Image (spheres, helix red, strand yellow):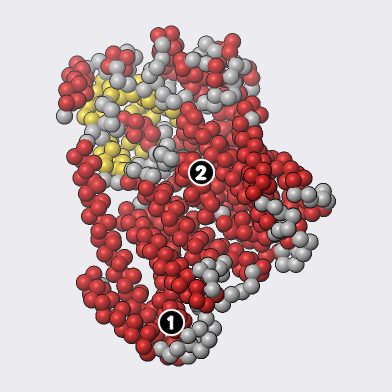
């Protein structure tokens, strides 16, 4: 069984502050993982380390069997990362943005393929419009197209629903369902329990830099752990 | 060497150096007594460059090893760098006034000291704008390393200026009598020990400061 | 190498669209020329002229560096670049190239205006100055790109950049002003020394920054 993500004692400290303790998890291919945690728990830090945007202080992490420390560029080809910032250029059109990212990843940048991708996220008609004119929801859609265009096998989403309207949320869910059905792996962080568990096969909770729960999404202990670690912990 | 040993040694050596500089060394023929400032000016200049080298190498070590103690060494030596650059400049100016009849000249050495001083100050300003410990270490060590590379380049650039301004004999001076050389050597040793003591002491204080900073963070969290 | 060219192409495409970098650099550089022309009477002091030019270039250049970095912080686009399968050093080179192109473009408009204001003849001397400008600008942006990325992490980005950039690029200014002065004064004996200093500066900082850039861009 190939592992999409294999994290072994990953830790991250910022000076004296420990953002992540020993995070050891294995995520098999094809899983849809919902990652929960309070603000500052370490979810974003972990995702950024997995996406090679940040170096861990210790530990090793493998994406699709590739060691991110030894071969980061190879690993990046397999990873798609989306946060609530879209990473797209507001002064270019949607199509120009996608073309640019294609060249960055060295994948086919033909108009046909990219227009097809834009159609999938419902932006075909606005392919040549400058992104500056887009609403947040539409910009996020371009971001989603950007994540998919190099065909990554592991998709990391950091609170992607933030600021999305109902229509964009539905579209994102459709795209995610398609991705998982095609055998790819998704790790998604969110504050919303229901949204996270909607299509998830696995649930993880990180609290103060440590993994406190890792189980199947349908298990009842997920809700219990959620309320214990995330809801009640706020007053601490 | 323990800090106390260094403290005692410098307490002893500085008056010794003063004696050698002011009483033992003969008066220079052309410049008179003001030339004696060389016995302070030169060691301070040497130590300012020492600070720059320590800053650069410690910065590089931090980038390689990631251990904050290197960053601590870097910024402590950069602080001493500001101090010794300032004293070098001031002693240079004190020398210049009676000899050149002006407080400042774009002499190679003084210009270099000024450039070095600007780099040290820039380094500290950068640090002051970075509240997170790790980021502060990482970014300021990058700058510290790049700034150290600038020092030899700065030297070459002041040679360019020399081609166009008259080469003014700074307080470096020409050949020296053996007794003067001895005075200079003793002064160098004394200031070197003082530097080592100040650095050790500053690092010790820095450790405490960082502990306090950490605890403040913990309390506020 | 393809990602490097993609980034350069993207920067140029964006600049074509909004023209913010070159226009602000250009305008600011020209204003600096104007201020100096009002402040100094250079008819008696030929030696000031190269200084005026390079002060204008330096301040315009710093403005350009600031603009270039704010372009990547909008929407956190830098993170998007860091996700790409490319070496961090290559990212640095792409940014240097882009910064160089824009700064040089602005300088090539400032230079003839300077020549007119300072009553210079449009002859071969200006071609020499163009060459010196290329060497000086390369040095300037080689360290400037790194420093602007360092400054981007601080809370007062636009303030700290000149505080770091100006001391670091003093050798470039000295060498560039000296060699420009030599060309204008028609006495180019020894011009190889400042020119080689410019070359050394660029090589040292391009290499050092290339190797060290990953530490600068990391989150």
Q: Mark 2 against mark 1, which lies toward the viewer?
A: 1
Q: Which residue lies at the image location 49% right of the left edge and 22% below the top edge?
A: A143
Vertical arrangement, residue A1 with respect to residue B21, above or below: above
Give the class, few, some or many, for how many residues have Cα within 10 Å of label 1's Cα (few <14, many ≥20): many
Residue at mark 2 to residue at mark 1: CA–CA distance: 44 Å
Pointer 2 residue = C148
Q: Nearer the viewer, residue B102 or A120?
A: B102
Element on which disc 1 rests: helix
Q: Is residue A158 left or right of residue B7?
A: right
Q: State the image quarter where residue A39 is shown.
A: top left
Quarter placement of the C terminus of chain C: top left
Q: Which residue lies at the image location 46% right of the left edge and 15% below the top edge?
A: A137
Vertical arrangement, residue B177 with respect to residue B209, above or below: below
Vertical arrangement, residue A146 with respect to residue B83, above or below: above
Q: Which residue lies at the image location 36% right of the left edge and 60% below the top edge?
A: B79
Quarter placement of the N terminus of chain C: top right
Report x, y in % for residue B9.
26, 78
What chain does mark 2 sit on? C
Q: Is residue C68 left or right of residue C53?
A: left
Report x, y in % for residue B122.
45, 53
Report x, y in % for residue B123.
42, 53
Tag of residue B108: none
Tag of residue B36: 1
Element on which disc 2 rests: helix
Q: Is residue C4 left or right of residue B103?
A: right
Residue C199 can be seen, yes or no: no
Q: State the image quarter where residue A210 is shown.
A: top left
Give the class, few, some or many, for how many residues have Cα within 10 Å of label 2's Cα (few <14, many ≥20): many
Q: Which residue lies at the image location 41% right of the left edge and 72% below the top edge?
A: B44
What chain does mark 1 sit on? B
Q: Nearer the viewer, residue A74 or B110?
A: B110
Residue C63 can be seen, yes or no: yes
């Amino acid at each position: 069984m190939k592992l999409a993500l294999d994290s072994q004692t990953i830790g991250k400290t910022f000076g004296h502050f420990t953002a992540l303790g020993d995070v050891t998890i294995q995520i098999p291919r094809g899983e849809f993982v919902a990652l929960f945690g309070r603000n500052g728990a370490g979810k974003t830090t972990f995702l950024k380390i997995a996406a090679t945007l940040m170096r861990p202080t210790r530990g090793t992490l493998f994406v699709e069997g590739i060691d991110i420390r030894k071969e980061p560029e190879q690993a990046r080809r397999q990873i798609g990362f989306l946060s609530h910032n879209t990473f797209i250029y507001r002064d270019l059109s949607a199509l120009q943005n996608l073309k640019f990212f294609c060249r960055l990843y060295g994948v086919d940048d033909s108009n046909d393929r990219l227009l097809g991708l834009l159609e999938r996220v419902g932006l075909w008609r606005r392919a040549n419009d400058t992104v500056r004119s887009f609403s947040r929801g539409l910009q996020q859609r371009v971001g989603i197209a950007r994540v998919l265009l190099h065909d990554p096998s592991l998709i990391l989403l950091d609170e992607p629903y933030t600021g999305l309207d109902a229509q964009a949320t539905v579209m994102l869910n459709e795209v995610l369902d398609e991705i998982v059905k095609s055998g790819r792996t998704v790790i998604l962080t969110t504050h919303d329990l229901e949204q996270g568990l909607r299509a998830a096969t696995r649930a993880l909770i990180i609290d103060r830099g440590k993994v406190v729960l890792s189980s199947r999404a349908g298990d009842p202990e997920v809700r219990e752990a959620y309320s214990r670690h995330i809801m009640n912990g706020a007053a601490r | 060497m323990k800090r106390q040993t260094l403290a005692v040694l410098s307490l002893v050596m500085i008056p010794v150096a003063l004696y050698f500089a002011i009483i033992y060394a003969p008066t220079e023929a052309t410049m008179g007594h003001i030339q004696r400032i060389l016995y302070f000016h030169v060691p301070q200049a040497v130590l300012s460059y020492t600070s720059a080298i320590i800053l650069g190498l410690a910065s590089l070590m931090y980038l390689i090893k990631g251990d904050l103690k290197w960053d601590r060494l870097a910024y402590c030596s950069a602080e001493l760098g500001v101090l010794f650059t300032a004293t070098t400049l001031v002693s240079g100016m004190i020398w210049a006034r009676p000899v050149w009849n002006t407080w400042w000249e774009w002499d190679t050495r003084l210009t270099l000291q000024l450039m070095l001083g600007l780099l040290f100050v820039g380094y500290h300003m950068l640090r002051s704008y970075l509240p997170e410990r790790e980021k502060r270490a990482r970014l300021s060590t990058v700058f510290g390393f790049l700034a150290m590379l600038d020092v030899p380049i700065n030297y070459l650039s002041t040679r360019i200026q020399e081609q166009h301004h008259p080469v003014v004999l700074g307080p470096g001076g020409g050949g020296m009598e053996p007794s003067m050389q001895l005075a200079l050597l003793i002064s160098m040793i004394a200031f070197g020990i003082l530097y080592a003591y100040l650095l050790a002491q500053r690092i010790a204080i820095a450790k405490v400061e960082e502990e306090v900073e950490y605890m403040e963070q913990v309390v506020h969290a | 190498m393809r990602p490097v060219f993609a980034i350069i192409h993207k920067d140029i495409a964006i600049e074509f669209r909004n023209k913010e970098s070159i226009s602000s650099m250009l305008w600011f550089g020209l204003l600096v020329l104007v201020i100096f022309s009002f402040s100094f009477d250079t008819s008696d002091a030929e030696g000031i002229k190269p200084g005026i030019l390079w002060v204008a270039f330096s301040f315009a250049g710093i403005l350009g560096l600031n603009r270039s970095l704010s372009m990547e912080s909008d929407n956190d686009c830098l993170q998007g670049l860091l996700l790409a399968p490319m070496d961090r050093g290559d990212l640095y080179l792409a940014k240097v190239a882009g910064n160089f192109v824009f700064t040089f473009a602005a300088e090539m408009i400032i230079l003839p205006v300077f020549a007119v204001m300072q009553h210079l003849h449009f002859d071969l001397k200006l071609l020499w100055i163009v060459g010196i400008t290329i060497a000086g600008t390369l040095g300037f942006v080689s360290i400037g790109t790194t420093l602007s990325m360092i400054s981007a992490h601080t809370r007062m980005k636009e303030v700290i950049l000149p505080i770091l950039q100006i001391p670091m690029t003093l050798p470039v200014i000295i060498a560039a002003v000296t060699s420009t002065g030599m060309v204008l004064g028609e006495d180019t004996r020894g011009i190889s020394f400042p020119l080689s200093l410019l070359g050394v500066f660029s090589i040292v900082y391009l290499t050092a920054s290339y190797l060290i850039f990953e530490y600068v861009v990391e989150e």
